[in-house]
Amino acid sequence: MVANRTRRLSVRNISVVILVLVVIYALVGFVGLPWWLERVLPERLEKHMGWQAEVGDIHVNPFVMSVEVLDLDAEDSDGEPVVAFDRFYTNLGVWRLVTGVVGLQNIELEEPYIRLDLLEDYSVNFARDWQANNPPAEDAPADDSDSAEPMRLQFDRFRVAGGELLFRDFSQEAQEDFRVTPLDLALNDLATWPREDSESNYYLLAAVGSQTIEWEGDLSIAPIYSRGFIKLGGVTHTTLQHFLKPYLPYQLRDGRVTLSTRYELQSADELFLTTSDGQLDIENLGLGLAGHDDELLTADRIRVGDISFGLNSRNVSTGTLDTDGVNLSLYRDADGAINLLEPFRNEADEEPADDSSDTDMPFRWTVAGVELGNSSVNWRDEQPRTGADLSLTDLSISVDELSDQLEEPVNYKADATLGGGGRVVINGQATPAPFTLEAGIAGSDIVLAQFGAYINEAANLDVRDGSLSVDGNLDLDQQQDPLTGTFSGAGEIASLDLRLGDSDERLIGWQTLRLEPIEYNVAPARLEIGTVTLAGPTVNVVRGGDGLH
């Protein structure tokens, strides 16, 4: 009896002790720890980052090992908001601690605000604030963390909802701000050590105005491995101009770019990267020159698909490059400078960059073809005395497959209407290196008056009327110096009215002049004409009082 009573008292006492410990644990967890965190968190942010922070409320549940932080706002030393969020929640997987894994089952971040500054020295504001408030100790022991095994962390579920990222770029002459909102991120089952039987997956959606980023796939940290799909949608010319300005010879003045691709990335012994199924779309492109208001090039649409790239295999291939509505405006000033080449004038005296690489593997590339339609080229020349304006409209060009095999022949075809009247069709094949060209040329009803500035430059003649038609074959070959080649065909000039530059009376004219066949050799220069047929000639010769004709 006494033993049983003693045993019951012992069990009761143990139960009371356990209950007291649970109550103390609950009080510390539910009351004490939140009170302590609300005071320590702002102090630590000020000590280690130099930020002034306020916390609305903190809740801790010691039984599920969760922490919830509400309404945090932090300002940097300049008094500008740097970090804020409405709610942060995380809970710890207790049972995984037994296996040496720190497992965070849920991490939820609602309505975060982050201000990221890229400074003039290309550092970021977070690193600057940390270094400024955490100077290295002089007697600090050497860091041997590389030899130690890193802590095993596992994130079961990570969510960012409705976030906003303000990116400010101070690295260039003019500051540019980019506000990314909404910023939604979903990441599942991510670990910091390699696991053969499991892969994490992620999804990111971010927007800068109407510009969007979509990114989804699988991700591993040790070793770094990612495979998935990424899409940049509707990226504006202002965004591209800001980031590509150091590398672009021309100004982007209009346009939107959409780029998507599948990819595989791995970083172990070496960086491995491949992309496939890429698609590039450019709409309403506009290019210009600094200091000039005129557009150099505009394009309604540029599209290329089936883009693939291999960093390690050193190759890139694309489908057909399809362009529509291209307008190129070329200009030559009185000194002979052409606007298209203006950005490269100062680079003529610079030493060429060393393109040598550590590998002897050549870079291979392939373009399935080029299709250009509904396009035009305008040419303004101020070098002749009277100035020249020429144009090609309804321009269409078709080119078959191009590749790094420059010695392979490429078939092409071009068709255009001259703005001043006439039509030209050229087709054949060419090899880029060594340069060879085979061209069938057909020109009909080409109005000569549009070339009057160049004719007047060679002689004091004014072309009032006349049209040229030509049909023949041109062969050029630059395998040896000098360039060799021949033209064979026939030509006709009809309704010619040629006058002296200071006279309104006809000097020479005819109904038709036909030359057939024509054989011209480039080097050495030689011209042979088989038959000259002239119909309805008119010649007006006047001898002046000074004896000059």
Image (cartoon, helix red, strand yellow):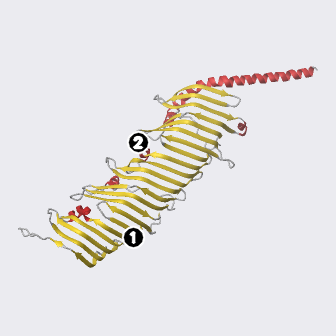
Which quarter of the image is occupied by the C terminus? bottom left
- Front position among marks 1 and 2: 1
What amino acid type should be assigned to the residue bearing mark 1? Thr
Disc 1 to disc 2, C-alpha distance: 45 Å
View extreme (bottom): residue: 530
Q: Position of residue 111 (x, y in %)?
A: 55, 33
Tell me which numbered mark, 1 or 2, is placed earlier along the sequence.
2
Q: Position of residue 135 (x, y in %)?
A: 52, 33
View extreme (right): residue: 1
**Which quarter of the figure has residue 520?**
bottom left
**Which quarter of the figure has residue 3?**
top right
Q: Secondary structure at mark 2?
A: loop
**As drawn, 218 above or below 16:** below
Seen at 60% across and 38% down, the residue is: 159
Q: Nearer the viewer, residue 1 or 457?
A: 457
Seen at 23% across and 61% down, the residue is: 453
Q: Position of residue 258 (x, y in %)?
A: 48, 49
Q: Residues within 10 Å of mark 2 (few under 14, many from 20)?
A: some
Residue 172 got which mark? 2
Q: Nearer the viewer, residue 235 or 198?
A: 235
What amino acid type should be assigned to the residue bearing mark 2? Gln
Which residue corresponds to mark 1? 436
Q: Position of residue 89 (x, y in %)?
A: 62, 32
**As drawn, 418 above or below 223:** below
